[in-house]
Amino acid sequence: MEKYIGLIIIVLLLIIQNRYTLHIYQHLAEQHPEQWKKLSQNSLDGTPYANLAESFKDGFFSTINDPKVVRYQKFKTLNLLLMAMITLASLLRGFLI
């Protein structure tokens, strides 16, 4: 069981990130319905979530100064960093022990 602690923590972090992502999507759909509608109507048949991820990188949502969006971006970065550190520690532990 001790071997799977890192995996369990990563799965829990992914679940938390997924719930927080869905929450921020709801918030953005309520606060910016016209932009959300534009992201939902893609000629390439992409999902609004994929379009939103691109919008966070260099689109409209990368320019807004909403505290919830800023907090979400920080959380996502820290969560990814934490998952990478746990993965690296698990790999090092597996190869060194």
Image (cartoon, grey):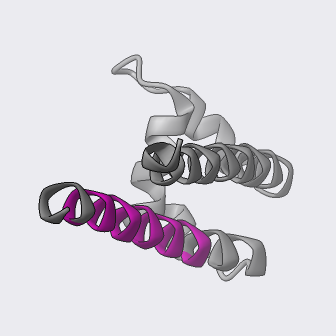
Write the residue at 48% across / 61% down.
56
Per the rendered image, the range of residues in magenta is 74-92
Q: Residue furthest right?
A: 30
Question: Residue 76's spot in the image, x, y percent?
Answer: 54, 66
Q: Quadrant of residue 46?
A: top left
Q: Is residue 94 left or right of residue 27?
A: left
Is 95 in front, or is 48? 95
Residue in the image at 42% along x and 47% along y: 3
Task: Please report the residue visible at 20 percent of the width from the left and 65 percent of the height from the top.
Answer: 92
| Residue 54 in the image, given as x and y percentages of width and height | 39, 51
Q: In this rendering, would 59 be left or right of 40?
A: left
96 and 52: which is toward the camera? 96
Q: Specify whether residue 84 is painted magenta.
A: yes
Asked if the magenta segment contains residue 88, the reply would be yes
Task: Please say whether residue 59 is visible from this viewpoint.
Answer: no
Q: Quadrant of the C terminus?
A: bottom left
Judge whether 73 appears above or below 3 on screen: below
Number of marks present in the image shown? 0
Q: Is residue 50 above or below residue 88?
A: above
Q: Look at 46% across and 70% down and name the residue there.
A: 82
Q: Which residue reaches farthest left?
A: 95
Q: Is 58 placed left or right of 56 in the picture?
A: left
- Residue 2 seen in the current view: yes
What secondary structure prevails in the magenta region?
helix
State which quadrant residue 96 falls in.
bottom left
Q: Position of residue 85 (x, y in %)?
A: 36, 71
